[in-house]
């Protein structure tokens, strides 16, 4: 795969809206980067997994995690005006 099509990072703006005690709202974003470990929950247990690949389809962005040599699909994010994709540059 050429690096011009290889995804490095996906960011999703306004993933979580938190209402603060003073009535204001805080927006949180989601940043997913290839090679970075994330804590996920499986059967109520915290487990660390590394993002090994991010793929782009016509309507979605697919995020894959790996545990050793096995990888599996973790998230299927919709592509919309809140989603931004960064590609690797040589």
Image (cartoon, grey):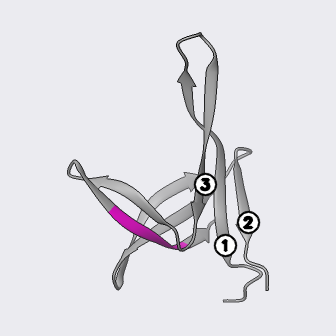
Q: Does residue 90 lie above or below 28 as drawn?
A: below
Residue extent of the magenta highlight: 48-53
Q: Quadrant of the C terminus?
A: bottom right
User: Residue at point 62% right, 66% down?
Assistant: 57
Q: How crowded is mark 1: few (under 14 residues within 10 Å), some or many (20 or more)?
A: some
Is there CB contact under 8 Å for labels 2 and 1? yes
Kindly identify which residue carries mark 2: 86
Indicate the secondary structure of the residue bearing disc 2.
strand
Indicate the secondary structure of the residue bearing disc 1.
strand
Q: Estimate the x, y position of residue 30 in percent, counting from the top left.
A: 58, 48
Q: Distance between the residues labelled 3 and 1?
A: 13 Å
Q: Earlier in the sequence, mark 2 or mark 1?
A: 1
User: Residue at point 20% right, 51% down?
Assistant: 43
Q: Give the main secondary structure, helix, strand or loop, of the magenta stretch.
A: strand
Q: Which of marks 3 and 1 is in front?
A: 3
Is there CB contact under 8 Å for labels 3 and 1? no
User: Residue at point 33% right, 82% down?
Assistant: 68
Q: Earlier in the sequence, mark 3 or mark 1?
A: 1
Q: Viewer-proximal residue, 50 or 65?
A: 50
Kindly identify which residue carries mark 3: 31
């Amino acid at each position: 795969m050429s690096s011009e099509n290889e995804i490095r990072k996906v960011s999703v703006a306004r993933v979580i809206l938190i209402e603060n005690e003073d009535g204001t709202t805080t927006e949180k974003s989601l940043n997913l980067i290839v090679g970075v470990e994330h804590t996920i929950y499986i059967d109520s247990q915290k487990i660390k997994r590394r993002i090994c690949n991010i793929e782009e389809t016509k309507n979605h962005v697919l995020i894959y995690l790996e545990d050793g040599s096995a990888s599996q699909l973790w998230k299927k994010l919709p592509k919309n005006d809140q989603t931004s994709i960064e590609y690797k540059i040589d």
